[in-house]
Image (cartoon, helix red, strand yellow):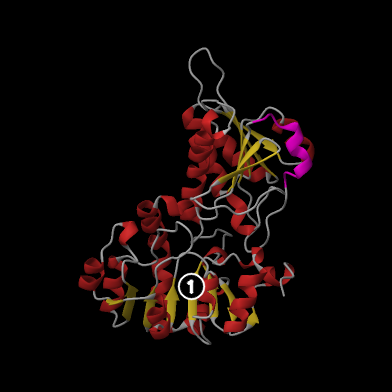
Amino acid sequence: MKIGVPIEIKNNESRVSITPAGVFELSKSKHQVYVQSKAGLASGFTDLDYREAGAEILPDIQSVYQVAEMIVKVKEPIEEEYSLAREGQIIFTYFHFASSQTLTQAMIDSKAVCIAYETVQDDDGSLPLLTPMSEVAGRMATQQGAKYLEKPIRGKGILLGGVPGVTPGKVLVLGAGVVGIQAAKMAAGLGAHVIIFDISMKRLRYVNDIMPSHVITAFSNEYNIRKHIKTADLIIGAVLIAGAKAPKLITKDMLKDMQPGTVMVDVAVDQGGCFETTRPTTHENPTYIVDDVVHYCVTNMPGAVPYTSTLALTNVTFPYIMEIANKGWKEACASNPALAKGLSLEEGKIICKEILKAELV
């Protein structure tokens, strides 16, 4: 199979979808990999690294799309790429279709075969291709939240972990999935007071077992959220419904109950966000303020740490890439139920029921 690796052109996205090690393995199996020049540079991989591993280096993104039978990416295609995708071409990447009508329609029109990382799902309900980026984003959510609590950025002026004689900051984490647990772990490690919310008592019991005593669990409902946001310093939105839009757990009217300088980090922004006032931001302009509350809603948080993120992502995506390359997408999806759940669009037809539920088309 001819496999294309284009440069990610989304704002400040520095990850790359296949490492030279992956190219080497694909080449050993007689597949041809075409890598756009400098695609891996920000992640620490040079064109020479790729060439020595067996890739052919192409000068521009158009050349990569033209030659490839399968495009492997990190983030969803953006407007400049819509016209490059073609009928029958496999595109394997994070898509987050439920949050973008424009992207969904563009991919339907292209008649490409779209397989989404974020909805590949194992029998136990876990999302193996989302997990490593959720781990990165969860840890970064606390790291970024702590930074934006600083006064020069119009935060409260609070050191999240406090110091002897001074009370530490209070962190609310909405969701006890992978993102939420990693965010809570980082916040607890800094010494903050942490409350983690979820609607699953099974998850809350798990959190209670693995976290230190200063991490408290709470059942997620509007009453409890409204109660705790009044004294929160940092609120992290970590809710995920696989393939679907995130529920709005904090509405605009709740902001008036928060203290000025409170920071909200919405890790669910790719799925529409779990705050009503969420709007996508970039690493160039990561924050905005609504009613004196600082919002951080960067859509590709792991892109800021591309070396770590690229290796963490490709560790889990590569076996699926190899399977699709070896078998073709139809046989690969037929023989692998987890991969089949990632199949979102098939040559103009919507396959994923969550996209249909989102009523995008």
Q: Secondary structure at mark 1?
A: strand
Q: Quadrant of the C terminus?
A: bottom right
Name the residue located 52 percent from the left edge and 67 percent from the top edge. 76
| Residue 326 highlighted magenta (yes or no) | no
Q: Is residue 101 left or right of residue 119?
A: right
- Residue type highlighted by circle 1: Phe
Q: Quadrant of residue 57?
A: bottom left
Residue 85: image x %, image y %? 50, 81
Q: Residue furthest bottom?
A: 87
Name the residue located 23 percent from the left edge and 66 percent from the top edge. 49
- Label 1 sits on residue: 92
Residue 319: image x %, image y %? 40, 69
Residue 211 in sight in this render: no
Residue 297: image x %, image y %? 58, 49
Q: Which residues are magenta?
A: 249-260
The correct choice, above or below, for 241 with respect to 226 in the image is below
Name the residue located 69 percent from the left edge and 29 percent from the top edge. 259
Residue 260 in sight in this render: yes
Q: Quadrant of the N terminus?
A: bottom left
Residue 256: image x %, image y %? 76, 34
The correct choice, above or below, for 316 with respect to 104 in the image is above
Which is nearer the eye, 65 or 126? 65
Q: Is residue 325 left or right of residue 221?
A: left
